[in-house]
Image (spheres, grey):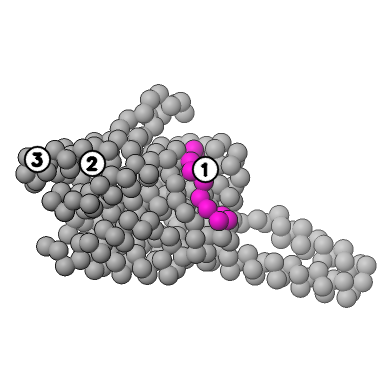
Amino acid sequence: MAGHQAQAGGTLYILTGPGLASCRRRPLSSNVRPHNPPPRFWKLKLQSISRATAAASLGHSQREIAQELVDRVFDSMRRMNVQAGIVQDYLTPEEWHHRTTEDVEADLAYLEIHRPAILAALSGYLADDSLRTREIDWLFLNLLTYAEYIATVTEIRKKLLGIDAYIKSPHPPKADHTPSISALASRPWQTVIASGATALSLIVHPALAVGVGALSLYWYMKRKRNIEKIDSLLTAMLRTYASFNTVDVSWSHVSRALEQSRLEGAVWDASLFKLAEARQGVT
């Protein structure tokens, strides 16, 4: 995920440590199966914005400045063109559309987003209110929240699979995405080892078997709680992103959604809160 840079926080320390790495390479293999159907919030009407039209409603002088910022945003993304498992070239998108669960796995595999360039463009955009359009507002909001979700999923998967296994994951990516890591975090062999250790300790002394069994149960319950926390975090981030599906989004809703997911462990860039604060009450 060349270019993805994001902080980790909240419950992410459970599996990912103090920070997210700066790059991504390959997606999760298709042998990880979703356990739940896609959330219904993905059924909302999808929004898309093109490079050519995002600043079209502005006057000439403002349009030129805003278009330069929009170009920087689109130029910060590139998609690998892969044929027969071989990267042929990289394509810069001319349109950004709201993502669904059917897009996420392919984006994890092939889409690269350079967040620092987008954040720099957003800083320039927020510094001049005359450049504002609903379309550009939405572009920054939607793209940055999605990039943060992708970066978080990537780092968790790399931690669970190991970087080498993550990079070597087979293609093509699976068709649909779920925020749950339960299947990925499953370790049946650890249960077998714990059971075997308990049985062997029983031969040595019953009291030892009780201690080993209690320790195994403690480890199992702790890991289970950690997985549930990560699942809750990813679900909250995905739900937050999914609600930003239109240029007509309520900015008071944006502030509430960002804050609510932050309380559940998500770490969004401060620029998103600045954008939401600046747009509340502005028509």
Q: Mark 3 — residue?
A: 61
Image x and y of residue 265, in percent: 46, 65
The residue lying furthest to the front in this view is 127
Mark 2: few, some, or many residues within 10 Å (few <14, many ≥20)?
many
Mark 3: few, some, or many residues within 10 Å (few <14, many ≥20)?
few
Q: Mark 2 — residue?
A: 69
Q: Secondary structure at mark 2?
A: helix
The residue under the point 58% across, 65% down is: 226
The disc labelled 2 sits on which kind of residue?
Leu
Q: In the picture provided, is 84 more to the left or to the right than 59?
A: right
Q: Residue 23 lies in magenta, yes or no?
A: yes
Image x and y of residue 165, in percent: 59, 40
Q: Secondary structure at mark 3?
A: helix
Q: Mark 1 — residue?
A: 29
The Cα–Cα distance between marks 1 and 2, rounded to whole angstroms, is 36 Å
- Asked if one can make out residue 21 in the rendered structure from this viewpoint, the answer is yes
Give the residues in magenta.
16-32
**Looking at this view, is 239 or 276 the one in front?**
276
The disc labelled 1 sits on which kind of residue?
Ser
